[in-house]
């Protein structure tokens, strides 16, 4: 049974690791094992992800208002609204790619959550992705100029994050930089892409909330609030680090956690 302290601590862990590129799913799996907490049900994850979703919606509210405005005034041909509509199109394409892959291989991805060695291995992969993303020279392409092929590649990168231990933000940011987005745009596109990804995943599982026991609502809600606050606070920090090519520090962190987890769980 998840208690109030468990909910808050796991919420903080989720909020921080959802945005910094170190894999929130992998950290939740390992954190629960390290702290010897009872394994929560899918309803708890829905609450935590909803907290992260609120954080990104609030932080990027001006961007979202602009994008929604361009869609509402779809007949308007002014350059700014046309470019905003193109960003919406590319976000939709990347999301569709991820959704199709989830529908085809979702059961396989979910089965991976039960394997601690697999999570450890994927953390090592995340470290490699982050380390080499700092070495990539961006081409200063903006999100509105992304194009269909590049948006599909970013969607494919996001689909890898269905594996626990692979960072969603890490793979999408690295994919964005790889296809030519400048670093600030890669981060912005990645965070905007998170909205339909988290929202869609929660909608798929929303029916499971009805099975939550009443005494679980308080720790679940407090966990959601903790995820929102901690997530909102780290977004700006991560964007600054991306611009300065400092993702390699997260790579070192992923490798350290993977090594400690290997020693603790495997050896």
Image (cartoon, rainbow, N blue to C red):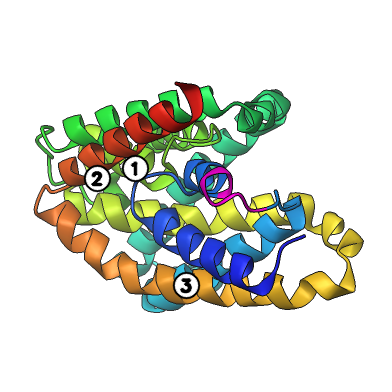
Q: Specify few, some or many for label 1: CA neighbours under 10 Å numbering under 14, 14-19, or 20 or more.
A: many
* Residue appearing at x 47%, y 60% in the figure: 13
Residue displayed at 47% across by 72% down: 55
Say few, some or many: other residues with alpha carbon within 10 Å of mark 3 (under 14 / 14 to 19 / 20 or more). Answer: many
Q: Residue at x 66, y 56 (%)?
A: 45
Query: How far from the left and from the top, in percent, is residue 104?
Result: 69, 24
The one of 148 and 1 positioned closer to us in this rendering: 1
Say whether residue 200 is left or right of residue 155. right
Earlier sequence position, callout 3 versus callout 1: 3
**Mark number for residue 55?**
3
- Is 34 one of the magenta-colored residues? yes
Q: Is mark 1 on a helix, strand or loop?
A: helix
Quadrant for the C terminus in the image = top left
Q: Quadrant of the N terminus?
A: bottom right
| Element on which disc 3 rests | helix
> Is the residue under label 2 in contact with that under label 1 (CB below 8 Å)?
yes
Residue 87, compared with residue 149, is above or below; it is below
Identify which residue is drawn at 42% across, 23% down: 121
Residue that numbered label 1 is attached to: 170
Tell me which secondary structure the magenta stretch mostly adopts: helix
Residue 173 place in picture, x, y as percent: 31, 44
Left or right, residue 207 beside residue 227: right
Query: Which disc, if any, is residue 205?
Result: none
Question: What's the CA distance linking mark 2 and mark 3?
Answer: 21 Å
Please check the rendered image and state whether residue 126 is part of the magenta-colored stretch, yes or no.
no
What's the CA distance linking mark 3 and mark 1? Answer: 18 Å
Q: Give the magenta-colored segment's residue range.
A: 32-37
The label nearer to you, 2 versus 3, is 2
Q: Residue 250 carries which label?
A: 2
């Amino acid at each position: 049974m998840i208690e109030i302290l468990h909910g808050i601590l796991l919420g903080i862990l989720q909020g921080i690791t959802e945005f910094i590129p170190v894999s929130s799913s992998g950290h939740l799996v390992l954190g629960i094992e390290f702290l010897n907490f009872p394994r929560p049900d899918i309803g708890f994850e829905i609450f935590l992800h909803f907290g992260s979703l609120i954080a990104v919606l609030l932080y990027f509210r001006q961007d979202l208002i602009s994008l929604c405005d361009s869609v509402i005034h779809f007949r308007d041909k002014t350059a700014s609204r046309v470019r905003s509509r193109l960003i919406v199109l590319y976000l939709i394409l990347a999301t569709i790619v991820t959704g199709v892959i989830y529908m085809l291989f979702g059961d396989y991805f979910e089965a991976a959550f039960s394997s601690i060695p697999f999570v450890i291995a994927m953390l090592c992969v995340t470290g490699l992705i982050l380390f080499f993303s700092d070495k990539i020279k961006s081409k200063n392409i903006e999100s509105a100029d992304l194009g269909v092929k590049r948006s599909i590649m970013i969607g494919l990168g996001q689909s890898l994050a269905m594996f626990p231990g692979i960072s969603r933000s890490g793979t999408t940011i690295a994919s964005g930089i790889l296809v030519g987005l400048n670093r600030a745009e890669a981060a912005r596109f990645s965070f905007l892409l998170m909205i339909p990804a988290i929202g869609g995943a929660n909608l798929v599982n929303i029916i499971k909330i009805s099975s939550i026991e009443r005494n679980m609502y308080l720790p679940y809600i407090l966990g959601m609030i903790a995820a929102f606050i901690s997530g909102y606070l780290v977004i700006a920090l991560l964007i600054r680090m991306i611009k300065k090519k400092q993702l390699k520090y997260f790579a070192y962190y992923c490798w350290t956690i993977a090594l400690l987890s290997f020693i603790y769980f495997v050896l």
